[in-house]
Image (tube, rainbow, N blue to C red):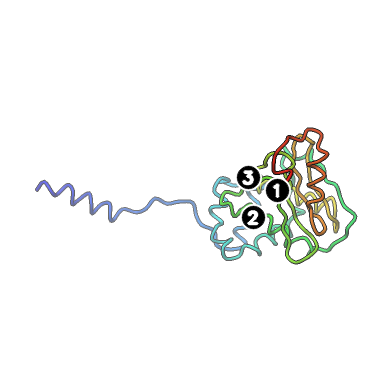
């Protein structure tokens, strides 16, 4: 009889229902809506957005990002970025030139699994075109959050329609994100060399 409690406990463990976790999103439309709620600060579970949309991105990643880019006119800067500056370039382009490089940059950050990534130096993305979407660190490392990066590129699109552009804050921010022809490294290199309060970091001199 002394085995009975152990047997009962084993049966209960085997038949118990696993705890319900946050729902997984599988469609393009639902994933896009979830991202817009995150950007609008109306998401009921902001910390779970990138986890919940994982399956949708596995199946439809590029389509999701291209729809977000088409919706740039709906996306506003968060309060802590409203003092940011956008500088427009002279090079004219069409939407097909820039949307795929931007989508690749967004995916680079999302693929970290948390919607943010720590990086240093310079990273650029392209899809066989002359246009590069880039992220530039002109200090000793940055953390890029999609909740910030998406509105930054939306702001470039609104301020510089059909042209290249770069988003940055003040010099103490030590970062810039934007679009360049062939390579954004020239922009990043200038920031590293001429930054007024540039820290000495070894990766600046590779």
> Which residue of the protein is positioned furthest toward the front in this rendering?
206
Is 3 left or right of 27, judged from the image as shown?
left
Whole-Å distance between the Cαs marked 3 and 1?
13 Å
The image shows residue 133 at horizontal and vertical percentages of: 75, 55
Mark 3, other Cα within 10 Å: few <14 / some 14–19 / many ≥20: few
Of the two numbered discs 1 and 2 on the same chain, state the one appearing first in sequence. Answer: 2
Q: As displayed, is residue 99 above or below residue 47?
A: below
Numbered disc 1: secondary structure? helix
Q: Earlier in the sequence, mark 2 or mark 3?
A: 2
- The part of the image, by quadrant, that contains residue 102 is bottom right
As drawn, 29 above or below 184: below
Residue 159 location in percent, x, y? 84, 50
Please give the residue where the numbered disc 1 appears in the rendered image: 149
Crowdedness near tag 2: few (<14), some (14–19) or many (≥20) residues, C-alpha within 10 Å: some
Q: Which residue is mark 2?
A: 108
In the rendering, at what x and y percent does residue 59 appear?
57, 65
Q: CA distance from mark 1 to mark 2?
A: 12 Å
Q: Is residue 110 left or right of residue 97?
A: left
First along the sequence among labels 3 and 1: 3
User: In the image, which is nearer the foreground, mark 1 or mark 2?
Assistant: 2
Residue at numbered disc 3: 118
Element assignment for label 2? helix
């Amino acid at each position: 009889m002394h085995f009975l409690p152990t047997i009962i406990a084993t049966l209960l463990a085997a038949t118990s229902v696993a705890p319900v976790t946050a729902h997984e999103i599988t469609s393009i439309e639902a994933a896009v809506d979830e991202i817009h709620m995150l950007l609008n600060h109306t998401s009921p579970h902001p910390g779970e957005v990138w986890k919940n949309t994982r399956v949708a991105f596995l199946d439809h990643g590029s389509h999701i990002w291209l729809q977000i880019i088409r919706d740039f006119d709906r996306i506003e800067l968060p309060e802590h970025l409203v003092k940011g500056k956008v500088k427009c370039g002279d090079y004219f382009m069409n939407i097909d030139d820039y949307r795929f490089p931007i989508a690749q940059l967004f995916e680079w950050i999302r693929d970290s699994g948390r919607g943010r990534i720590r990086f240093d130096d310079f990273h650029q993305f392209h899809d066989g075109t002359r246009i590069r979407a880039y992220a530039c660190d002109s200090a000793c490392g940055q953390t890029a959050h999609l909740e910030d990066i998406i509105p930054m590129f939306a702001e470039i699109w609104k301020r510089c329609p059909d042209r290249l552009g770069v988003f940055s804050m003040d010099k103490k921010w030590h970062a810039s994100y934007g679009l360049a022809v062939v390579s954004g490294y020239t922009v990043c290199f200038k920031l590293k060399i001429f930054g007024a309060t540039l820290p000495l970091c070894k990766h600046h001199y590779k």
